[in-house]
Amino acid sequence: MTDLEERIAHLTRSVEDLSDVVARQAGEIATLERRVRLLMERAAAAEAANDGTVPLADQRPPHW
């Protein structure tokens, strides 16, 4: 019985550690998504300012 209690305690600790890792990674992913969105907006604004045309990201590929 003691062996089972020890195993449960270790498994509980492992689950808590993994939960902390997932929560931290979710925060990092959200930050990265915001940064990518900002960079895409800046690139689109720069393209529009230089050419005055539709940004490349919004253009259809030539084979369509």
Image (cartoon, helix red, strand yellow):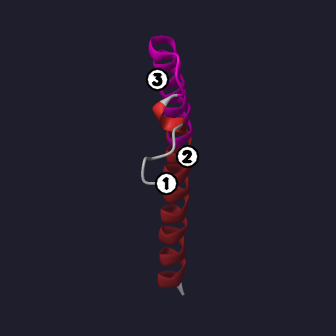
Q: Camera-side residue: 63 or 12?
A: 63
Decide: few, some or many residues near mark 1? Use Cα within 10 Å; few <14, some 14-19, many ≥20: few
Residue plotted at (52% across, 53% down):
22
What secondary structure is found at the residue carrying circle 1?
loop
Is residue 36 depicted above or below 11 in this figure? above
| Helix, strand or loop: magenta stretch | helix
Decide: few, some or many residues near mark 3? Use Cα within 10 Å; few <14, some 14-19, many ≥20: some
Q: Camera-side residue: 14 or 7?
A: 14
Q: Which residue is mark 3?
A: 43
Q: Please report the bounds of the magenta region as a residue range.
A: 29-54
- Please name the amino acid that badge 2 sits on: Ala
Residue 28 point in image, percent of width and height: 50, 39
Q: How many marks?
A: 3
Spatial distance from mark 3 to mark 2, Cα to Cα? 26 Å
Checking the image for residue 13, the label placed there is: none
Is the Cβ of the residue at disc 3 closer than 8 Å to that at disc 2?
no
Residue plotted at (44% across, 12% down):
50
Nearer the camera: disc 3 or disc 2:
3
Spatial distance from mark 1 to mark 2, Cα to Cα? 36 Å
Residue 23 point in image, percent of width and height: 57, 48
Q: Which residue is mark 2?
A: 26
Q: Which residue is mark 1?
A: 64
**Is residue 63 part of the magenta span, yes or no?**
no
Spatial distance from mark 1 to mark 3, Cα to Cα? 24 Å
**Extreme residue toward the front, this view:** 63
Residue plotted at (54% across, 27% down):
54
